[in-house]
């Protein structure tokens, strides 16, 4: 059984490392978890190393709703079950890897079944009804 993991905390850590590698200094960082929904928010305040006293500051914020990610993962796995395949697609919900940039941009086409997948699900459902 394959299990997918989405390491958002690791992404934030990589983002900070990338900023430091490019001459920025991490001034402050915060991580919030909403206890009811488990929605998480990371905030990182950065500024250029040579301008530590200002005037330039950069505020990065990443807001993640784990319920949306879990729902997408469940829909992906149901897609495998409904199409009776372990195959993955190049794009859409059934792609094997979900990039952090895709999670952030929230394009609907990244999280839906492709027309061929919808047709395969319908065909399989019709076949199962005939049996």
Image (spheres, rainbow, N blue to C red):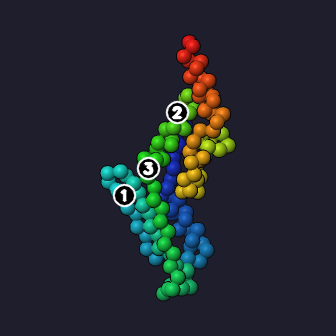
Residue 78 is marked as 2
Q: Position of residue 57 (x, y in %)?
A: 50, 79
Left or right: 33, with 85 as reference point: left
Q: Earlier in the sequence, mark 1 or mark 2?
A: 1
Quadrant containing the C terminus in the rendered view: top right
Residue located 59% across and 18% down the image: 127
Q: Give the residue number, with chain letter if any, for mark 3.
A: 66
Q: Residues within 10 Å of mark 3 (few under 14, many from 20)?
A: some
Q: Nearer the viewer, residue 3 or 99?
A: 99
Residue located 48% across and 62% down the image: 62
**Residue 59 visible in image:** yes
Q: Quadrant of residue 86?
A: top right
In this rendering, is residue 74 above or below 38? above
Residue located 44% across and 67% down the image: 43
Q: Earlier in the sequence, mark 2 or mark 3?
A: 3
Q: Nearer the viewer, residue 73 or 20?
A: 73
């Amino acid at each position: 059984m394959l299990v997918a993991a989405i390491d958002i905390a690791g992404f934030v850590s990589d983002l900070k490392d990338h900023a430091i590698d490019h001459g920025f200094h991490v001034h402050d960082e915060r991580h919030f978890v909403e206890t009811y929904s488990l929605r998480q928010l990371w905030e990182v305040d950065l500024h250029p190393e040579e301008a530590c006293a200002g005037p330039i500051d950069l505020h990065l914020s990443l807001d993640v709703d784990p319920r949306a990610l879990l729902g997408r993962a469940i829909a992906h796995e149901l897609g495998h079950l409904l199409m009776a395949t372990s195959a993955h697609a190049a794009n859409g919900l059934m792609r094997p890897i979900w990039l952090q940039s895709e999670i952030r941009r929230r394009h609907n086409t990244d999280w839906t079944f492709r027309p061929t997948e919808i047709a395969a699900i319908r065909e399989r459902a019709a076949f199962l009804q005939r049996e």
